[in-house]
Amino acid sequence: MNSFSIEPVLNRHPLIVNPSTPLIETIGLMNQSHIISCNLEGDDSDSEFNSLIHAHTICVLVMADAQLLGIFTELDLVRLTAEGRTLVEMTIGEAMTQPVTTFQSTEVQNLSDILSLTHRHEIRHFPIVNKHNQLLGIITLEAIQRLLQPMDWLRFQRVVEVMSNTSIYALPTVSVRRVTQLMVQHQVSCVIIAEPFESPENSELETSVENSHLRPVGIITERDIVQFQNLQLNLNNIQAQTLMSTPLFSVSLFDSLWSAHQQMQQRRVRRLIVAGEQGELKGLITQKSLLQALEPQEMYGVIEALKRQVCQLEIEKAELLQSRTEELSEQVKKRTLELESANQQLQEEIIKRRQIEQQLAHDALHDPLTGLPNRALLRERIEFAIQHAQRHPDYLFALLFIDLNRFKTINDSLGHLMGDRLLIAVAKFLQESLRDNDLVARLGGDEFVILLDGIHELQDATQIGDRILDRLASPFDIEEQAIFTSASIGIVLSANNYDSSNEILRDADIAMYRSKNKGKACYEVFDRAMYLKTLKIVEDVQEIESRLVSDGEKLTTNQ
């Protein structure tokens, strides 16, 4: 491994801000950087491969006058959330970790040096500077682990050998802020949301029951906290079960790591719960666990040994041709070919690893059931369309917010498997109904959104709406069974001068609910009056609730 350069894992373009940058703005940059990095596509060139290596580790370096002052990572954000700090009022200079431990390029000549420093300092981020203390880039432990991954070796190890036995968990009813406190307290990057098989006497029970008595129901990660804070959610009042990722997928203790890897690919997830025979929680295995299971020194030692043996055999071959018979010469050729074949197989495994990493980057922005773009990719495309519309006044686009009617009834009566197949059939139809430059995404459940790019007038959008309603008026033939459904559609145009994807998605949702209240199986085009009416309803409800609380307090006082 000593012969391998650090260049493939050195990120020369890290995210950099100045100390006065608002913390909320920095969180937005981190979240945006994650979305962009997960959208990498292309061939297997070195530049693309290096980008994939750095794609999943997001941190921010704080600099002023070309001097490195501090660093801010996802772990720092979880810590601030756990402490209940008011992030809106903070700058990155107040939140960063300082001083920063840096390393000169002469200290890390190869990957062995970096791994040694990892154990010595117990850190995951390595800012690299030159002899003048000028920043050259940053290296992360995740980047190294993603570089070293021969897939065939995973077939010979079991889940129980590498899984995390100490699982940190919390009840579904605890607050998300409490979840972040558990992350900080136990120094973990995720918390499993679980419930006891038997109801506990203490409703606030956390991490105090044996794993074998717990049923896992969801999970919350550091990356989730970055997204929640980017949306400026009040994590003190939101229960974990509201924001947790679910459903979970599991493997057994004695499944192979290769089997776990394949299931991660098929399910399009990055973590798997390790469950016992009764579905009880046994532990957790992640993509990082798979990478840590490999022994990089052994892998590269084998490659180097093979190279030396090939060279030696070439020398032996020349000597034997001079002093031995033709039979011995053929034996040398055979051995040489076998070793070259083994070396070729290792190279093919490296190519497979690159392809898998590209697939993982694609999966982060697509719905695992239908293969459609997910909410994150949809928001990115909408933001791009909004910016384009602001620069080009003649440019027009539209959103169609689609909600399937009777979907819950189909799930309850025919089963979730039939419901999933209906969603897949609807997704296929929507894709086939659009132009190449349009986008259809699944937000979750039975909700879809269509982005019509570069239309001329409102009629272009309503024609698509009519086409969808006409098709859904006919049943879908699924496993020789006719499944009937319909849709409520909300349509909104970019002509309303939107500034963000949240605003236009909100108005499309309002129009969709107006069509649902109108009688379903129809569409409604958003206008300003809809928003004002919805806002008035919300204000009236809040006023009624306020009066009820006030009247209740008066009644208690009189008693």
Image: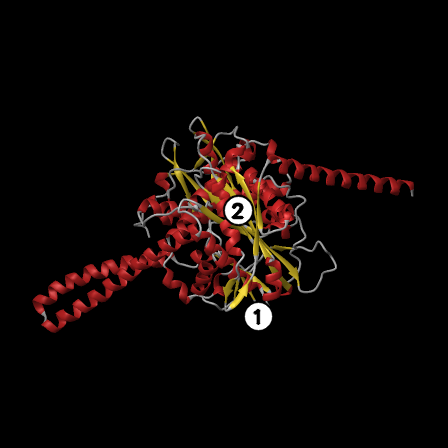
- The residues tagged by marks 2 and 1 sit, at their Cα atoms, a distance apart of 30 Å
Three-letter amino acid code at the position of disc 1: Glu
Find numbered disc 1 in the image and state the secondary structure of the residue it sits on: loop
Q: Using residue 280 as the reference point, say whether residue 366 is left or right of it.
A: left
In the foreground, 45 or 143: 45
Q: Which mark is residue 277?
A: 1
| Residue, disc 2 | 223
State the residue in front, 548 or 169.
548
- Give the mark, 2 or 1, whose residue is nearer the N terminus: 2
Characterize the local packing of mark 2: few (<14), some (14-19) or many (20 or more) Cα atoms within 10 angstroms.
Answer: many
Label 1 CA crowd tier, 10 Å (few <14, some 14–19, many 20+): few
Q: Is residue 252 left or right of residue 217?
A: left
Q: Which residue is at the far top?
A: 65
Q: Answer whether residue 65 is visible to the viewer in this image.
A: yes
Going by the numbered disc 2, the residue's amino acid type is Arg
Please identify the quadrant where the C terminus is shown.
top right
Question: Where in the figure is residue 27, as x and y percent of width and height?
Answer: 53, 38
